[in-house]
Structure formats: C-alpha cells, structure tokens
C-alpha cells in the first residue's frame, strides 16, 4: 500500500460487475472495503474472497443507509449502484422514473451528504462517482430518464469540487462507455441474448478496466485530483449524425 492516507472505503452496487471489481481492486491495496448491495448471497461470496465487510441494504433505503454510515469513518465513497430501462420518455412509466431517480440520483445525493461531513471533519476523503457517457451525450436508443440521472451526477461531481474547496477531499467522476456487465441482460431479460446483441461482435470494456481506473485515481498522490475520466473501448466513438428522410407531403 502507498503512503496515501485512506483506510476505509464504501462501495455501492458491490455484488457484481463493476462494483464487485472495485471492491476487489481496493482490497488489493490494503483498504478495508465495505460492500453495499441488495444481493446478500453474492455479497457473502465476495466477502469470503476479499475479506470485505458486507451490508445487504438497498441504496434507496434511507433509514438503512443512515444506520450503516453512523459510526463509520469512510475515507473513500464509491457511488456505483445504478439502474437503467429500455424505451424513452414517450413510453416510460411513473414507476420507472421514480426507480431511476431514486437509485441513480437521489441515493447518490443522500449518501454523499451523509459521508462528506465526516470527511470534512477529518480533512481527508475521496468521492468517486461512476456515471456513464449517457450523462454527456445524446444518442438514439438511450433511455431518456437514465441519461438525465447520469447528467445529474455529473453536475454533482463538478459542484462538489466547489463545495469542498480548501479541504483535502478529492472528487472523481469515472464515465464508462459500453462495459460488459449484467445490466444489459436485465434490460432485455436474457443475458445470453444480451451477449449476442451487445458483446460477442464487439471488444467492449470489462468491469476490471473501470476498477483499475478508480484505483488509479484513488492511489494517485494527494496533491493530484483526477476529476474526470471518460473511459471508452478503443473501437467505440461517441457522436455521429442522423438525418431523417422527408415524409410524403412534407413542405
């Protein structure tokens, strides 16, 4: 472990994918990692593997989160938990909007609020927000509510740097493009079909790529704040131009 001062970390969405890999990577650095997710069985397996402290709590459970944080001195907060949906604003449901806002944005705001007070008191800490290129770019096929929530966390990450000015508290946003995780399987209801559609013919990012990006930011010298990292597959670009054809009878 380097001479950086961090001793404890809290990682949300930690039971699989990017979250689980972040737990593994930070544990390799000798940091005591608290892993938070809803899937108790997967968390227990991760604990046996890494020695992490597990908390089977939903990030949207405000009372549960407050009880968990109370008494913990968290040096590193990794806001990783997130959900997505298919469709866009024209066919989404009120329940989908509430779920995405609750998990992707409200939970990040609430957990950050709870943890940052202790960081200020100790004058040390690092907040890492895992967002998405969906928070920075508009593209066809993306879920509008998901894009909006990730854009909100992007704005939060920037504003936190202003709020924490003068304190030795760093803020990092890691914004991945396509990464091979189970979220795609949940979106279409079949992970095997998701692999065929999204991964088999593409060289996507892997969860460990994002975990290594987080570790780079966290383990960097204290004088250095890696404020934003956009991580894309080498063969993927963002942008592009779509031009709709005229409809018959259009002026």
Image (tube, helix red, strand yellow):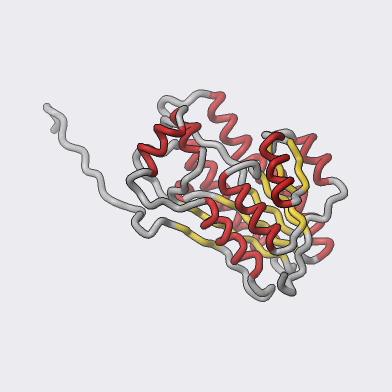
Residue depicted at 59% across the width and 36% down the height: 101
* Residue that appears at 83% across and 40% down: 67
179, 175: nearer the viewer: 179
Task: Work out whether residue 75 or residue 138 is closer to the camera in this orientation and state it.
Answer: 75
| Quadrant of the rendering where the C terminus is positioned | top left
Q: Is residue 161 left or right of residue 31?
A: left
State whether residue 136 appears in this view.
Answer: no
Measured as percent of width and height from the top left, residue 68 is found at 81, 42
Front residue of this view, candidates 195 and 6: 195
Residue at position x 36%, y 53% in the image: 238
Q: Along the horizontal axis of the image, is 62 left or right of 93?
A: right
Residue 229 vertical placement versus 94 (above, below): below
- Percent position of residue 132, x then y: 49, 49
Q: How many marks?
A: 0
Q: Can you say which quadrant of the picture contains the N terminus?
A: bottom right
Seen as rendered, the residue at the extreme front is 49
Residue 169 horizontal side relative to residue 20, left or right:
right
Residue 239 in sight here: yes
* Residue 136 placement (x, y as % from top left): 45, 51
Say which quarter of the image contains residue 128. Answer: bottom right
The correct choice, above or below, for 139 with respect to 159 in the image is: above
- The picture places residue 141, in percent across and down from the top left corner, at 37, 37
């Amino acid at each position: 472990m380097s001479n950086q001062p961090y001793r404890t970390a809290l990682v949300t969405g930690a039971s699989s994918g990017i979250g689980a890999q972040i737990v593994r990577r930070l544990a390799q650095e000798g940091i005591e990692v608290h892993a938070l997710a809803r899937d108790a069985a997967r968390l227990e397996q991760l604990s046996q593997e890494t020695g992490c402290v597990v908390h089977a709590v939903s990030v949207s459970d405000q009372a549960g989160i407050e009880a968990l944080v109370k008494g913990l001195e968290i040096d590193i907060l990794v806001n990783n938990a997130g959900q997505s949906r298919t469709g866009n604003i024209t066919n989404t449901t009120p329940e989908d909007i509430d779920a995405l806002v609750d998990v992707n944005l409200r939970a990040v705001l609430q957990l950050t609020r709870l943890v940052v007070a202790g960081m200020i008191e100790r004058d040390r800490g690092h907040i890492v927000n895992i967002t998405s290129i969906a928070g920075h770019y508009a593209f066809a096929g993306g879920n509008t509510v998901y894009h909006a929530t990730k854009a909100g966390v992007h704005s939060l990450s920037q504003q936190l740097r202003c709020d924490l000015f003068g304190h030795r508290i760093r803020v990092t946003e890691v914004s991945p493009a396509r990464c091979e995780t189970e979220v795609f399987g949940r979106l279409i209801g079949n992970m095997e079909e998701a692999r065929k559609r999204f991964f088999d013919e593409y060289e996507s990012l892997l969860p460990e790529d994002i975990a290594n990006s987080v570790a780079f930011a966290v383990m960097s010298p204290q004088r250095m704040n890696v404020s934003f990292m956009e991580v894309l597959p080498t063969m993927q670009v963002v942008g592009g131009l779509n031009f709709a054809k005229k409809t018959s009878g259009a002026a």
